[in-house]
Image: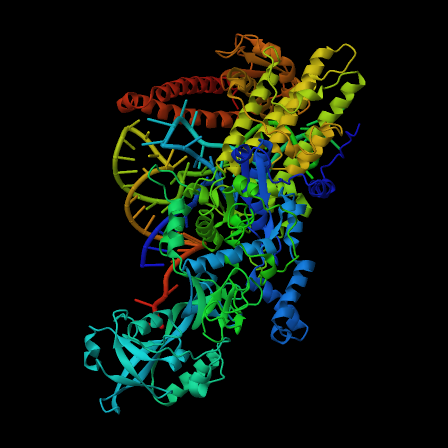
Amino acid sequence: MPHDLPKAYDPTAIEDHWAEYWVRENLFAQPTPTGDLDKARAQQFSILLPPPNVTGNLHMGHMFEHTESDILIRWHRMRGNRVLWIPGTDHAGIATQMLVERQIVSEGATRQQMGREAFVERVWKWREHYGGNILNQMKRLGASVDWSREYFTMNERLSVAVREAFVKLYEQGLIYRGAYIVNWCPRCQTAISDLEVVYDEHKGHLWEIRYPVHGDDGRETGEFLTIATTRPETMLGDVAVAIHPEDERYTHLHGKKLRLPLMNREIPIVLDDYVSREFGTGAVKVTPAHDPNDFAIGERHHLPSINVMDATATINEHGGPYAGLDRYAARKRIIEDLEAQGLLAGVKDHVHNVGHCDRCKTIVEPRLSTQWFVKIQPLADKAIAAVKPDADGKKAIRITPEQYEKVYLEWMGNIHDWCISRQLWWGHRIPAWHCATCHKITVARQDPAACAHCGSDQITQETDVLDTWFSSGLLPVSVFGWPNIAGHQSSRAPSSRFLSGARVGDQDAVTPSARADFDTFYPTSLLVTGFDILFFWVARMIMLGCWFSSDVPMADGSPRPLAESVPFREVYIHALVRDANREKMSKTKGNVVDPIEIVKQYGTDAVRFTLASMASPGTDIAFNVARTEGYRAFANKIWNAARFLFMNVDRAAEIGIAVDPSVLGAMPIEAPDAPLEVRWIVSELHATAAKVNQSLAAYRFDEAASTIYQFFWGSFCDWYLEIVKLRLDFSETADKFATQAALTTLVSVFEAALRLLSPFMPFLTEEIWHALYDGNPPKKSIALWKFPEGNPSAMNGAARMQMIYLQFVVGGIRETRKDRGVPERLTVEAQVLGVANNQPTNLIEENKKWMEKLSSSTITETTQRDDRLNWRSVGPTDIAIIYEARIDVSAERERLTRDIAKYEKGLAAAERQLGNQGFLSKAPAHVVEGLKKQESETRTLLEKARETMRALPAG
RNA sequence: GGGCGGUUAGCUCAGUUGGUUAGAGCGCCUGCCUUACAAGCAGGAAGUCGGGGGUUCGAGUCCCUCACUGCCCACCA
């Protein structure tokens, strides 16, 4: 009998084993459904794992997100749903390219020297060896995902979807190419989207520069127009100066021209409402190639654009004498030169926000360049409709917590076209070909041999790749096989042979891309993610998902409504994990808590429980190991409860008593004649299960966790286990039937509680559960067994009230013993006055045995207070203990004084309320009744306390 | 500039539609190695619920206002 659990709970000893077992046995795979798809669809519960970067390592935020998802997934799985949780990684264009580039540089080479093809090959190699470490970490932490469906955003299947999506949008006129101001990272040497720019407050300067005014004859009049700028180097590309049309200071300059200092170019003064008269000097230099607002002014006034910087933000040939200088070297030189020429009117300190590259933190340079964009409004319209309540108040996508719905809608309502091209090498290459003959563009599902417009074979493929989020935004459709879904465009979808960027043969783990997957699992049930990628990813998935899936008919051939086009029905936005001091964890601060390290120390289960118990919505999590220590103790507690169980099961076996395993796996139901503690604990179990289910449905992981904690420790261990010890009588004279009944309840309640805890602490519960079944479990894992459902009719209010009453009595005796200084192990006689109203008269008598044990006393019931004793009121009754040692009169007096004050205060408050006519007439009856009852109870307690005080001996 | 959170015990956090004397864990104090568990058991101390005002019979909870704090969006050079 393998019931010999080691004495101390050692998570490391069990966790590796089960983690490996779950993966090896492929326990959480969800095969493509066959047969009744309607049924499968009705039962499905699915989550798409937000793909971590392939370069990533697991941090606390991941672990938190995975814990929440895993709890929900395990919960639904145990409730009998057809559960699917799909893992994968993101190719992470910039991040991965940066990482491999750094490697190459450390070897003394550059990617440019290598060439594109060799570089991409190198990235694939890197990925093979080091990529996806984070998934291995997830395996160790027991995330119950379907590993057979693991995806990678650059794999063939997903690349097919990317290409189809691009081509389709292009055909629909929703992708265009053009020269616009974009955020440019000079280090990454690529365009980045607005979202990828992070702003930092920066103490800079506002330089005031004097531009000489020209007369009509083209000569300087001696007058100057002074402009203000924070980026003087961009003046090299100035094509005008703008002033407000109604600015009276400058009315006389309307229509005049200026000399652009340093470049000595003549530029016009233009009138534009955009200019603020209050800021700076009221005159703005206009540099359309380096500022989005200036670009807009340039458009309005038909001004040329002069791009003065190259891809590395070095001044180019349009920068005259400054060509070849870095932007900041140029700035310095320009200021010096202006000063030398007397054109620098002033310098002011100026705090402003400076944009940095989200990836490498380099200061972003707005720069004119030719890029590909998605015309986003039509997609955004659908994405708004998907989240807003419809005419019936229904929402196709429900966002929790609700406050984020507003944030989402506001962002979506003010959305700008999405720059999707990146000047990188690692990513999905844009399927567009430029014709050298007619200069037109051919966009195609299959690589073209000739220009679609003039037939020329002088075509070359676009070198840009797509924004990483373009492919991850398609995941909800692409993981289920879109566009290669039977009956949908299969003939038109690109074949893998023609894919660019993706590598043929680098297959995902096998997944049959049949329609059945799409029909069953799309839309997915839920997305669990952080606020930080609400716009990056969540919004894009909604836009792209709604857009592309709406063309896929429903399984029965009917058109797909919006509610079925959405990529997921619910979004749960979790909190952020911070360090114990509420600081954001970051590598530079060095306060990153490595979950794997913590897990090694305390066990995965304890860390999971910590995260779950702190996961209340709305507030960030300050991760504190002190709490984890507490939950490791909780795990240890359960471990030891299990040891206690096994010890007794084994002892019972020795005298031929066995627990019938068939009673396990269900919710215990009490027999009406069972002892009180049985009726009580079974009732508590049902109440706990009901509460946990209810909390999980509302994403209240904290509530669910504390409910289980309270049940397991507070009810099961502290009371039930202590009571049941007395029922487990293995002696010759024992009533074997009663012992067996007690043992059966003990084991079945414990087993059910294990299942309740399992989603939170999968390792510990798996270990104990297997031991409980003695190597013959009904399933391969507790995770595949049944989750306890609480049955309201099994909740026994009377048993609960009786138990609470007896706990009061036991507590009262313990309290009194302490106050009287009774030695811990000395048994004393305790008298209990009567029995409270509404309780069975033989209640104490029937439960006396365990009450005496738990209070180290012998209990006598009496109907008369013996005034020679020192009585104490506890809850609804009075208690006295017989102990000859001297009472510490002053301590007793102090305690009573405190009590009396408390009662007086409470009584006064209650009396005031009850004397209030408004209260009596307006408050609901049960509140008034409750208060009256409380008032009379308090009055009794007060009187008793005063009496006891009077009876105290002097001194 | 606009918006959204947070402020409850020494610490970290709960607290349903307003309703009886505001809870938990950790920490702290006291006593116990009681054969499941010292990662434990039993008992205890500790909060004018950020300040002010209002609504109400009744406010931690609703409204106004102020303070502190965190985040998001915008990006007037």
Work out whether A458 lies above or below A725.
Answer: below
**Nearest to the observer: residue A849 or residue A509:** A509
x and y percent of residue A658 in the render? 75, 18
The part of the image, by quadrant, that contains residue B68 is bottom left
Query: Which residue is more in the foreground, A722 or A345?
Result: A345
Front-lying residue, A509 or A793:
A509
Position of B8 relative to A414 (above/below): above
Q: Position of residue A256 (x, y in %)?
A: 23, 83
- Locate residue A635, reporting x and y percent: 65, 36
Residue nearest the observer in this picture, A759 or A860: A759
Above or below residue A938? Residue A317 is below
- Quadrant in which the N terminus of chain A appears: top right
Is A664 displayed left or right of A6 in the figure?
left
What's the image's color scheme? Answer: rainbow
Q: Is residue A611 visible?
A: no
Q: Is residue A559 left or right of residue A579?
A: left
- Please indicate, yes or no, whether residue A550 appears anywhere in the rendered image: yes
Total label count? 0
Q: Position of residue A740 (x, y in %)?
A: 71, 15
What residue do we see at 71% from left, 37% from top? Answer: A9
Picture quadrant where residue A814 is located: top right
Question: Which quadrant of the view contains residue A333?
Answer: bottom left
Task: Point out the residue furthest to the front here.
Answer: A455
Say above or below: A372 vs A253.
above
